[in-house]
């Protein structure tokens, strides 16, 4: 209907000799007395027509002729309000029930290739709360964009080289030596989590002291594999299934990293200083330069990261989205500089910064530290509140907003808990339809003609536009907010309307309506990785 309103305004403007479609903005008024749709286009055309807004609005109104619009009102200071025939809302019910799980789907993506890389936690420990938020955002965005016709690849980058993996091996070896009553120092920056002890215990139980003569590479590889498998297992439990895992080690084999540096040098972005090789990214997007090769001739982590993104470009993506923690904000400029310095378009890469999450329990903030081993893990969270609550809550807020995760609220089985409230709407409808399903979808509806019904119908009708908005703005929380509002409108409708009655026609039409609501709730929740229960 919005598109129809835009088209009739566009035609009216053409009659007035104006071509300014880009200025047309349609809104849904908060107050019903202001119509179903409203536009402020007259206020934007004052300079073009050299008239006051009320005159312009009246001119536009005079040039509109559309049988689906029942009434047009002009209101100060120049708004045009449209009252439309509600038949389109009824027609949409048939569309929902016909399209089922495809309701809301579109092809705005035109099969453009999108790469979304998220979580990518180092395999040096178990996934924690911050990873849970990034995972929910990345996977929900991928689901939404696929639903909108994009060709999406979900990717996990495995940091299986470098100093952190060395520290992992040394940490496991230290714990293993303790079990063998031998001394081996814990490295500076070592890992103290229970998972490190568990790996060492497993080695000792299987081999006793036979690993004392093993070199550090053995401990590194064993620890990395164990922890990576655990990470993947937890992510699958969290309903995230990646399309591709890319290894830092494999990237370093695929591309000669020294050749990458040579290319940067040929392009004029490398110099030597104090025995180190520097990347002059201050010529591009950064405010300072960074080391590529240290004095001891070892590479910094920037080199393989540039090579990894070079590989992404070579795979032909139209757009790449990286989701980093907020502590990586300074890294974005040097990464984009590396992309530009290698001759690629840095605008194809978009970096989302994940703001901090605080876990609150009994009004107290739960302290978290990965290195100390006191972190709250993703698996702990899922076991405590379930996948639905975790996925819903982390999809509830914009990524750039700091959030407090209230553990007590997430566990509540009451309407105070938003995920419970939404899922209860779905379960309530499922229960009714189990008792009595629709007889048929009538050609003509006669009883769905009051304001309570129209409120529900309008919210269901809005879903396809909500999906488009979430995809184009890359904001899954738009879906989460929408499905809560839909559940709220349904619960209000349910409290006022007797769905099952002696009037068979009215009952059947009510059942058609709530079945469409249930399908819409399901489709919306599916886009954020929530599976609503049939009964509660």
Image (cartoon, rainbow, N blue to C red):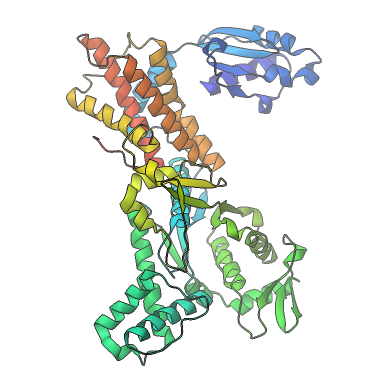
Looking at the image, is 466 positioned above or below residue 18? Answer: below
Direction left: furthest residue: 435
Q: Position of residue 233 (x, y in %)?
A: 33, 61
Q: Residue at x 33, y 11 (%)?
A: 445
Q: Position of residue 95 (x, y in %)?
A: 37, 25
Is residue 162 visible from the viewing direction of this image? no
The part of the image, by quadrant, that contains residue 88 is: top left
Looking at the image, is 408 positioned above or below residue 25? Answer: below
Q: Residue at x 33, y 26 (%)?
A: 516
Q: Position of residue 484 (x, y in %)?
A: 42, 32
Q: Is residue 311 left or right of residue 226?
A: right
Closer-to-camera residue (139/484): 484
Q: Residue at x 37, y 20 (%)?
A: 492
Closer-to-camera residue (17/364): 364
Q: Residue at x 65, y 9 (%)?
A: 75
Direction bottom: furthest residue: 213
Image quarter where the C terminus lies is top left
The part of the image, by quadrant, that contains residue 497 is: top left
Q: Is residue 348 left or right of residue 230?
A: right
User: How many labels sit on residues?
Assistant: 0
Looking at the image, is 207 positioned above or below residue 292? Answer: below
Q: Is residue 267 left or right of residue 466?
A: right
Closer-to-camera residue (270/404): 404
Is residue 97 visible from the viewing direction of this image? yes
């Amino acid at each position: 209907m919005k598109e129809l309103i835009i088209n009739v305004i566009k035609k009216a403007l053409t009659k007035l000799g104006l071509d300014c479609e880009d200025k047309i903005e349609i809104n849904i008024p908060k107050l019903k007395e202001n119509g179903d749709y409203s536009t402020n286009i007259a206020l934007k055309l004052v300079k073009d027509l050299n008239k006051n807004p009320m005159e312009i609005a009246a001119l536009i109104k005079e040039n509109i002729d559309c049988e689906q619009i029942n009434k047009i009102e002009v209101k100060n200071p120049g708004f045009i309000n449209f009252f439309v025939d509600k038949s389109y809302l009824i027609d949409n019910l048939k569309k929902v029930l016909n399209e089922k799980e495809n309701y809301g789907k579109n092809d705005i993506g035109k099969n453009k290739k999108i790469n979304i890389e998220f979580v990518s936690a180092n395999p040096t420990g178990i996934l924690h709360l911050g990873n849970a938020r990034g995972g929910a955002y990345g996977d929900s965005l991928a689901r939404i964009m696929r639903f909108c016709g994009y060709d999406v690849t979900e990717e996990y980058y495995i940091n299986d080289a470098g100093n952190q993996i060395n520290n992992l091996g040394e940490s496991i070896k230290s714990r293993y030596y303790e079990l063998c009553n031998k001394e081996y120092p814990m490295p500076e920056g070592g890992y103290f989590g229970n998972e490190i002890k568990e790996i060492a215990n497993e080695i000792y139980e299987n081999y006793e002291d036979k690993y004392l003569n093993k070199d550090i590479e053995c401990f590194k590889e064993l620890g990395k594999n164990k922890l990576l498998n655990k990470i993947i297992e937890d992510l699958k439990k969290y309903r995230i299934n990646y399309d591709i895992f890319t290894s830092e080690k494999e990237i370093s084999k695929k591309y000669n990293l020294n050749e990458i540096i040579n290319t940067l040098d040929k392009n004029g972005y490398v110099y030597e200083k104090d025995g180190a090789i520097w990347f002059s990214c201050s010529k591009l997007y950064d405010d300072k330069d960074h080391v590529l090769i240290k004095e001891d001739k070892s590479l910094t982590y920037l080199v393989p990261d540039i090579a990894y993104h070079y590989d992404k470009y070579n795979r032909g993506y139209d757009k790449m989205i990286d989701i980093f923690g907020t502590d990586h904000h300074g890294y974005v400029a040097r990464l984009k500089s590396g992309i530009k310095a290698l001759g690629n378009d840095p605008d194809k890469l978009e970096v989302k910064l994940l703001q901090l999450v605080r876990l609150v329990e009994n009004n107290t903030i739960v302290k978290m530290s990965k290195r100390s081993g006191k972190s709250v893990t993703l698996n702990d969270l899922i076991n405590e509140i379930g996948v639905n609550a975790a996925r819903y809550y982390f999809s509830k807020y914009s990524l750039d907003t700091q959030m407090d995760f209230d553990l007590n609220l997430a566990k509540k089985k009451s309407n105070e808990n938003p995920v419970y409230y939404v899922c209860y709407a779905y379960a309530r409808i499922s229960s009714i339809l189990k008792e009595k399903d629709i007889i048929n979808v009538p050609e003509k509806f006669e009883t769905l003609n009051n304001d309570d019904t129209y409120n529900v119908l309008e919210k269901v009708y809005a879903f396809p536009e909500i999906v488009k908005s979430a995809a184009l703005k890359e904001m899954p929380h738009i879906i989460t907010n929408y499905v809560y509002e839909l559940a709220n409108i349904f619960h209000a409708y349910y409290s006022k309307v007797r769905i099952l009655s002696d009037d068979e026609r009215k009952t059947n039409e009510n059942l058609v309506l709530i079945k469409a609501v249930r399908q819409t709730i399901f489709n919306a929740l599916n886009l954020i990785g929530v599976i609503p229960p049939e009964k509660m």
